[in-house]
Image: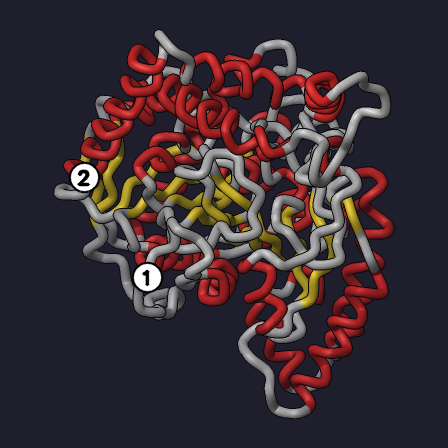
Amino acid sequence: MLINASLKQLSLLLSDKKISSVELTSEFLARIQTLNSGLNAFITLDEERSLTQARDADEMIASGRSMPLTGIPLAQKDIFCAQGWLTTCGSKMLSNFVSPYDATVVERFNQAGLVNLGKTNMDEFAMGSSNETSYYGPVRNPWDLSAVPGGSSGGSACAVAARMAPAATGTDTGGSIRQPAALCGISGIKPTYGLVSRYGMIAFASSLDQGGPMAKSAEDLALLLNLMVGFDERDSTSLQRDAEDYGRDLEKPIERLRIGLPKEFFAEGMSADVASAIESALDEFRKLGATFVDISLPNSKLAIPVYYVLAPAEASSNLSRFDGVRYGYRAAQYTDLESMYKRTRAEGFGEEVKRRILIGSYVLSHGYYDAYYLQAQKLRRLIAKDFTDAFQQCDLIMGPTSPTVAFDIGEKCDDPIQMYLSDVYTSAASLAGLPGMSIPVGFGRKDRPVGLHIIGNYFKEAQMLNAAHRYQQVTDWHQRMPSDVLA
């Protein structure tokens, strides 16, 4: 079945000319047309533009100019600028913004001959853990339409899980690739901060934002990461490193792998159904020959309060550019320049974005900067040091990605603190700039997916992908599809 094939399988079919990119793209576009009205995973589609890219890819293959993944269709999170495409960031503020240029990530995929299927729905300006803050309405989890898909990359996670796209891009600030990957039963990875260019990726919190791939398996993620990673002089935070093949160690045995289990990740807060699935997954790693080490990350309990001081502070600065002057939404009625600013921002931003801008402005204000912002930066260093110490004892760290399975749409909308706690296990790695990933490891309450969180040391993505791939060779959670309805 094409919709459940791996990227390697699809690439082989394309290179052997057993299927064309136009045929493959058309199949996924047809599936999007059938399913999107019920799932709301895509904001923008442009069938003719996608098929034009597919025809160009077929020409690349026919002329012998193809690269790995040429002709493969994928979905782009609507936070990445794509020339000629509506790029909204899930906000009314950018609901009329057509990007005049490509983000580096989009540019790299275009150069490799991949096909953009469309732009996926997301929490407004990537602020959310459930994809309910989008101006375009909530995305629904394909495993249970009454449940959230996670956020902010919920549209991308839903698109891959429902097999509307073989892969998608996402961004992760405090868990926004890993948490929706877990709640939708797919694989997703946030690389080491600075490996993937942020140029053309609309900023939320610049010291935390990082792009990454979302797909069915670790093997697929490795192929995508090979294209996404690379130095970009247009991004001041981009790291200059030699290119590497992230799939080089996929088949390597993991008999000597030391897995750290932080006591803080297995304390109260994790639901029993998630705990059961995680324990079963760890048993599989034990059978594969890995050993386990008890470790501690004592400052990880401070990750959520630290994150929700630093991220809003950076957001309050980054979002000041959206004022109705140069691009995007502008209020219809105003009396002077100040009135235009106020009305535009009041009407253009949603409630969660306004909340974070206010929090950020508060912690940066005179009299509170030292008490909140500087204190949070000090704690951020302590959180990073905990990981440095832990990696003296182990190679990888594992635990749950989310404390619960997907919750119901509307369940946490009136309780921001409970919503923020959805990222309790993922935000610490983000604050430290470490790579993290989530893979599906079973199902919990109401048959909703559970994800295993894997954290590696800096630049150890290949090792993480190796461990995940070896697990996926002996299990089939990553091959499960949401339901017969979506088959």
**In front: label 2 or label 1:** 1
Question: What amino acid type should be assigned to the residue bearing mark 1?
Answer: Gln
Q: Judging from the image, what secondary structure is the residue with disc 1 in? A: loop
Which of the pair 104/188 is nearer the observer?
Answer: 104
Q: Residue at x 30, y 37 (%)?
A: 432
Q: Residue at x 30, y 50 (%)?
A: 287
Determine if residue 341 is in view: yes
Marked residue nearer the N-terminal end (2 or 1): 1
- Label tally: 2
Instruction: Give the left or right position of residue 176, taking residue 229 as reference.
Output: right
Which of the pair 342/319 is nearer the observer?
Answer: 342
Instruction: Give the left or right position of residue 218, taking residue 366 as reference.
Output: right
For mark 1, does the 10 Å Cα neighbourhood hold few (<14), some (14 to 19), or many (20 or more) residues? Answer: few
Give the number of the disc on residue 388: 2
Q: Which residue is mark 1?
A: 240
Q: Examine the image and state in which quarter residue 153 appears.
A: top right
For mark 2, does the 10 Å Cα neighbourhood hold few (<14), some (14 to 19), or many (20 or more) residues? Answer: some
Q: Examine the image and state in which quarter residue 1 appears.
A: bottom right
Q: Examine the image and state in which quarter residue 368 appears.
A: top left
Q: How is the image coloured?
A: secondary structure
Determine if residue 301 is in view: no
Q: Residue furthest bottom?
A: 63
Compared with 121, 350 (above or below) is: above
Give the number of the disc on residue 134: none
Q: Judging from the image, what secondary structure is the residue with disc 2 in? A: helix
Q: Position of residue 295 (x, y in %)?
A: 19, 32
Which of the pair 406/410 is nearer the observer?
Answer: 410
Q: Position of residue 114 (x, y in %)?
A: 64, 69
